[in-house]
Image (tube, helix red, strand yellow):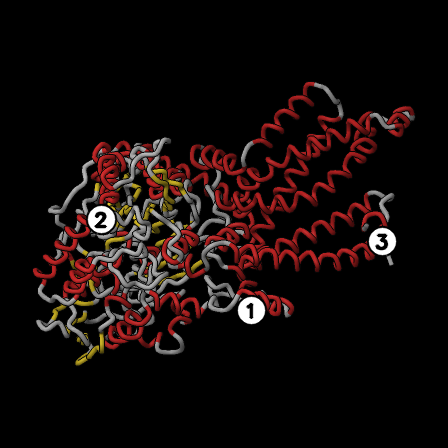
Amino acid sequence: MSGFTISRRKMLVGSAMLLASTAMPKLALAQTPKKGGRLVLAADSEPRNLNPAIVASNGVFFISSKIVETLAEASFDGKDGLAPRLALSWEGAADGLSATFKLRDGVKWHDGKPFTSADVAFSALQIWKPLQNLGRTVFKDLASVETPDDLTAVFKFAKPTPFQLIRNALPALSSVVPKHIYEVGKIEDNPANTAPIGTGPFKFGEYKAGQYYRLTKNTDYWGKDEPYLDEIIYQVLPDRTSAASALEAEEIQLAAFSAVPLADLDRISKVPGLKVITKGYEGLTYQLVVEINHRRKELADLKVRQAIAHAIDKDFVVKTVFLGYAATATGPVPKNDPQFYTADVPTYAFDVAKANALLDEAGYKKGADGKRFSLKLLPAPYFNETKQFGDYLRQALAAIGIDAQLVNNDSAAHIKAVYTDHAFDLAVGPPVFRGDPAISTTILVQSGIPDGVPFSNQGGYKNAALDALIAKASETLDTTARTDLYKEFQKEVAADLPLINVAEWSFISVARDTVGNIANNPRWAVSNWADTYLAG
Amino acid sequence: MTRALILLRRRLVGSVFVLLIVVIGTFLLLEAAPGDAVDAYIVSTGGDAGMIEMLRHRWGLDQSELTRLANYLWALLHLDLGQSVTFSRPIRDLILERLPNTLLLMVSATALSFGLGSALGIYAGARPGSARDRFLSIGSLALYAVPGFWLGLVLIVVFAVDLRWLPIGGIETLASDKTGLDRAADIAIHLILPVAALGFIYLALYLRMMRAGMAEAWRQDFVLAARARGLSRRRVVLAHVARNALLPLVTMLGLQSAQMLGGSVVIESVFSVPGLGRLAQEAVASRDTPLLLGIILTSAVLVVVINLLVDIAYAFLDPRVGAGEAGA
């Protein structure tokens, strides 16, 4: 049985490396960039459609951001938090009616054809605007894309569009796919959706359903000496406990997107040769939010909403539910956002007595059984933490005399119950902040959204002042004025509590010491990985 | 016509009705579950009202339930399992890709639990009430009480993480480009832990049945007669006692196959084996009704075929079982 001897040998090599890694200073080991090698990492889901131009979601980006590139990517130190990728520079016109992108020269598609402005125009007009989950909102006023030469693309908007929004949307919404591949047949049925062709540092190799995705080095990549790695293998590990075991057994070298549960991090950080990394997800912030159904008469009362906000001990939630890997929230923009966040908003300190007083004031006295009223609480099942916070919230509400009945559903049932059927009083949701409030944040509180739209205001909340503020910000072109309006927006949301922001968190990576250049940008797990390497 | 053929014909007619009921029942159950494939899909993407409408139309979910069921049955009549909405691939391909892994896992685990279980049962039942009998009975019962996923996790921690003798999961080494015997050996090594986790749980069942059957057979007159004829103890145990105790085990084998299929869902998840069970789990989570129907139909056919084989085997093993009695 040859396979057995191989794994025995691997085991010996593995333990030798283990010895070396504990004996040598860790820094020396991690700082020798080396060419070549196969990076194996954990994947917990298998996206069916790998075209990031159509499906702009983290699950898709995790794999396809190495194959298909965007115009610009997120950066810790670049201007406006951006670094060039397919576009070298970008500029918005003062009237907000056009935006000009200068493109990188000498870039080739994986099939050898040259990348030009025609590809950008095609992607923007035929895919981002009509088909992309997020682009349909951000690029809704895009009228045409002019291509005066092969390396210039000029976006023309039918209505003035703030360039700040377009800029902030670039890292997630601007994946460029080849026109010559997609102009044949229906875009949704194109075979390249499952075997993507891009300009990125890695080419799509193969996909074995239920087993792995293989990406191979693009030897023709435009980045000098890049990529370092020969191959990236995404090993499908559906079980929550598998990733930690696979890291310990040295079968994988990296588990991103918190594939290792928070509860295991303390133990695994002590395993020699493994490191826990909390950086590299600054641009992918999830918000723990209590969604409120304002159709319930009790919850339509601001005093009741304030009481609920006062009943939640945010510090306790961060410490207990997130084991410290989170921050308390003050409003609808997360603290780590460099452009829009303001701390100058009404806050609700943890104060059970005050919460009880507010409820008394509102006229909901405690009954003989100590209960004021009862309501239905639906925690979203997508994360362990949202479910655990649901358990906490039930107890916190019990302390102020509100009897919350927990209703647990699976993902599809939860989405339908909350966003289509409105069959909830309170729900726990994890909306994502995507670098600009206009992408997916204002929709959480804005009125007039049709039934069935997920992660939007389906709680029947209507506030004319807030709606006017959102409308004004969407057409304000000046960056400073626009930013100020969104600060105003945060104040209004925190004051009127259409929903309650509790905490903000992001993901955690666990990797072998040998994996280099990890977490070097704010969206690292969904970036191109051209400079990622395996040290010897 | 031989006994087996009569039996086969009767069974096939009955099976068609069973399968029809299974299909309609599953369809209705899935329709009753809140949320459809689009609801499940937008969990990871979000999307506006227009996009959601577009998706519902593309996936045919804007049609009524009755229309969809009728369309499905009509296609099924033409032996067409249809297209998976979430994978955008023919369901037949998806199932054929996963079925061999599940079958391999099930057959190996059944062989382990049946083979080792009955052998240990004979060993225990040869001397009922002895120390080894009591030890094996208690030990196997303890294993039977252990949940499959827990046993799987313990095996992983001990043999894959601590000792590193065996791979942690999967059906073969990833992207290894192995072929022929090398690949077969590779798959065999990957199957050791999942087969052990699945097989050991059912081992107790066969062991205890075998042991009980033997204890009963010992009291039978023909055993007394055999012993009186001066046959060796070994021959009495194997040819007379064990052979008669084996029959109920064969029946159990058929019944167990359905449970084994259910147990493999959990084991496939724990060991990341790309099998039918995991596909079914994904189909439920993504509300992919045609895919789940296809999988359930395949599993039902599998169970029917296994039971048919068991019945036929039974007819041959025990000459007293005529077609009339077995098929009734």
Residue of label 3: B3
Image coordinates of residue A309 in percent, x first then y, are 24, 41
Image coordinates of residue A308 in percent, x first then y, are 26, 41
Label 2 to label 1: alpha-carbon separation = 45 Å
Which three-letter amino acid code belongs to the residue tagged 3? Arg
Q: Which mark is residue B217?
A: none
Classify mark 2: helix, strand or loop: loop
* Residue shown at the point (36%, 56%) measured from the top left: A419
Q: Residue furthest top?
A: B131
In this rendering, which labeled residue sits more in front, label 2 or label 1?
A: 2
**Nearer-the-camera pick, A433 or A484:** A484
* Residue shown at the point (22%, 35%) measured from the top left: A357
- Mark 1 is surrounded, within 10 Å at the Cα level, by few (under 14), some (14 to 19) or many (20 or more) other residues, namely few
- Mark 3 is surrounded, within 10 Å at the Cα level, by few (under 14), some (14 to 19) or many (20 or more) other residues, namely some
Q: Are marks 2 and 1 on the same chain?
A: no
- Mark 2 is surrounded, within 10 Å at the Cα level, by few (under 14), some (14 to 19) or many (20 or more) other residues, namely many
Answer yes or no: do the residues labelled 2 and 1 have beta carbons within 8 Å? Answer: no
Residue of label 2: A497
Image position of A476 (left or right of B140)? left
Classify mark 1: helix, strand or loop: helix
Q: Chain of mark 3?
A: B
Q: Chain of mark 1?
A: B
Label 3 to label 1: alpha-carbon separation = 43 Å
Q: Chain of mark 2?
A: A
**Nearer-the-camera pick, A122 or A356:** A356
Residue of label 1: B67
Is any part of residue A142 visible from this angle?
yes
In this rendering, which labeled residue sits more in front, label 3 or label 2?
A: 2
